[in-house]
């Protein structure tokens, strides 16, 4: 739902990159009056964040985005080939089980933003461009924000809440006094280009590649327009040098790391130099102002996680803020946003610092690194990139019992499965954007057991108006979800019966036995009070 320009919205989103757009979509589709502004007169061009991981694709699906057309516009990330200096290459598939989007997608960030902008417009919200947030002041009932137009005009907006999604340079973050300590990676730099190429670069051009040699690291990825992304982490001989590199500088770095001395670039664009650092805001919320994406955490762009992490920030924050605005929950619900998302950013920053190799310092043990990708547990190596294992077991929103074997526990992601062939997927049920209770009777074929499950679930969810779906072996009343094959029951580890409270973002908030309606009731009362 849009708040017309020059009117006071319930939420003002500052920044219209992927994170700001996703935040606005999640608010608007829940009936929140929202405005979104961006300092740029036109969208920023370029491919930039071009890897969209599996969980992000699931998030887009749950948001109701036209995911089919989006997938058709990109390139499947099918394999990653590791090249360790002096050792045979190692080819590993990128597919991950347990999701309808087993492969990452390679697509330019501008195309991602176009999809999000179109969808937001379909919800009645237009991005207001050429408006820069220059100052804000909080009061007990709202936030006053001063905007400056590209033509020098001044505007004042009074919003109930403000979300800062401006990127690393955030006036919202500065205004709330959140600390922002940069942890640089000295002596190294990241050089990047999108280009067509010829030469003896090894490996299948349709794969993504990672080269590690004494000179540094190099990643390559195919792009939808036939170019390839090249990004090289190498020593920085002159930290005072500013500006983006020319083609010759990037090519020299790529040749040194890969050993392909005959490599040539053609039709290159988007040359880019990055001096690497990590920074995570000391807090994500102050009163009625919140931070998301690069305004909350800027991490070294060496594992292609920045945009994906930011999108999941927005997906986490959107439903919570909407619930508070709509009066369905107290502002205490927003405390769980920082509690859940800030540790994710801190862990990502630590991992990047620990694993990045940029040609400076002791040379990594390449043989050991390769062996870790082929030895015991190698199947799990790299799955953290996908976003699928991410969970919030320690969240204040997570409670109940942890399953002894199989199925998601409190704080874990719910798998996307079909209850029966041809039936709606579970994500279609969750994608409506509300809380959901799934009740599994002890005997899915026994109507009496189904009645018990329904009563226990209703006792726990009724007062908050949370819809209940009783999962049985056949068709029944309107609130029954048919699972004739037991696929859903097995996937959730509910063979003995269970009650699940599933959050609007598809994570388990509560898991208990089928007769734990009272415990569910107490949890719902605490979460949605």
Image: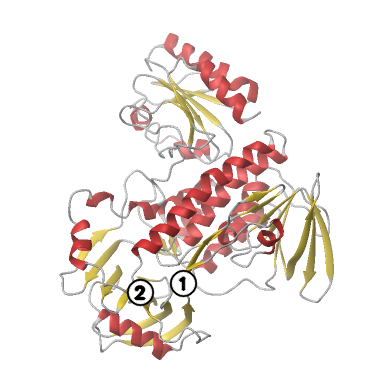
x, y (%) of residue 233? 37, 75
Q: Camera-side residue: 234 or 428?
A: 234
Residue 339 in view of the camera: yes
Residue 76 in view of the camera: no
* Rendered position, 298 above or below 266: above
Residue denoted by label 2: 358
Residue 90 relative to residue 124: left or right: left
Query: How is the model colour-coded?
Result: secondary structure
x, y (%) of residue 201? 25, 80
Tag 2: Cα neighbours inside 10 Å, few (<14), some, or many (≥20)? many
Residue denoted by label 1: 276
Q: Residue at x 40, y 63 (%)?
A: 353
Q: Camera-side residue: 236 or 2?
A: 236
Query: Quadrant location of residue 493?
Result: top left
The furthest residue to the top: 448
* Rendered position, 360 above or below 432: below
Q: Residue at x 65, y 64 (%)?
A: 170
Q: Residue at x 19, y 62 (%)?
A: 368
Label 2's element? loop
């Amino acid at each position: 739902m849009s708040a017309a320009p020059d009117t006071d919205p319930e939420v003002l989103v500052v920044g219209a990159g992927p994170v700001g757009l996703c935040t606005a979509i999640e608010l608007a589709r829940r009936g929140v009056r929202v405005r979104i502004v961006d300092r740029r007169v036109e969208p920023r061009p370029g491919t930039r964040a071009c890897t969209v991981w599996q969980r992000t694709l699931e998030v887009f699906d749950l948001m109701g985005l036209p995911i089919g057309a989006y997938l058709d516009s990109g390139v499947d990330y099918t394999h990653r080939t590791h090249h360790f200096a002096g050792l045979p290459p190692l080819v590993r598939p990128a597919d991950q089980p347990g999701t309808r989007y087993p492969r990452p997608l390679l697509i330019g960030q501008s195309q991602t933003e176009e999809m999000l902008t179109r969808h937001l417009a379909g919800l009645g919200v237009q991005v207001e461009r050429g408006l820069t947030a220059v100052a804000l002041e909080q009061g007990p009932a709202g936030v006053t924000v001063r905007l400056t137009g590209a033509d020098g005009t001044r505007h004042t907006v009074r919003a109930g809440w403000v979300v800062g999604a401006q990127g690393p340079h955030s006036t919202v973050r500065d205004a709330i006094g959140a600390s922002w300590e940069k942890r640089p990676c000295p002596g190294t730099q990241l050089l990047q280009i999108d280009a067509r190429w010829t030469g003896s670069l090894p490996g299948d051009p349709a794969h993504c590649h990672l080269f590690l040699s004494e000179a540094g690291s190099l990643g390559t990825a195919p792009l939808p327009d036939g170019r390839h992304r090249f990004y090289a982490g190498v020593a920085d001989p002159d930290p005072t040098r500013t500006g983006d590199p020319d083609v010759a500088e990037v090519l020299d770095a790529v040749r040194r790391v890969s050993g392909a001395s005959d490599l040539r670039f053609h039709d290159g664009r988007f040359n880019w130099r990055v001096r690497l650092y990590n920074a995570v805001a000391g807090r994500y919320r102050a009163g009625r102002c919140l931070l998301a994406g690069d305004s909350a955490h800027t991490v070294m762009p060496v594992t292609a996680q920045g945009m994906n992490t930011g999108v999941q920030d927005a997906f986490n924050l959107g439903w919570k803020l909407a619930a508070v605005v709509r009066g369905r929950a107290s502002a205490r619900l927003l405390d769980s946003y920082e509690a859940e998302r800030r540790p994710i950013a801190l862990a990502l920053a630590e991992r990047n610092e620990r694993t990045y190799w940029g040609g400076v310092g002791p040379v990594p043990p390449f043989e050991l690194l390769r062996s870790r990708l082929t030895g015991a547990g190698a199947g799990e190596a790299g799955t953290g990139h996908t976003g699928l294992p991410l969970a919030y077991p320690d969240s204040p929103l997570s409670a109940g019992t942890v399953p002894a074997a199989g199925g998601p526990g409190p704080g874990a992601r719910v798998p996307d499965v079909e209850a029966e062939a041809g039936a709606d997927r579970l994500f279609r049920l969750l994608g409506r954007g509300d809380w959901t209770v799934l009740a599994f009777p002890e005997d899915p074929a026994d109507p009496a057991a189904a009645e018990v499950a329904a009563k226990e679930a209703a006792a726990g969810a009724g007062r908050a108006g949370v819809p209940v779906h009783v999962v049985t072996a056949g068709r029944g009343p309107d609130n029954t979800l048919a699972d004739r094959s037991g696929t859903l029951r097995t996937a959730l580890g509910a063979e003995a019966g269970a009650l699940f409270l599933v959050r609007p973002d598809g994570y388990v908030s509560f898991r208990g036995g089928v007769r734990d309606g009272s415990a569910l009731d107490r949890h719902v009362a605490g979460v949605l009070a």
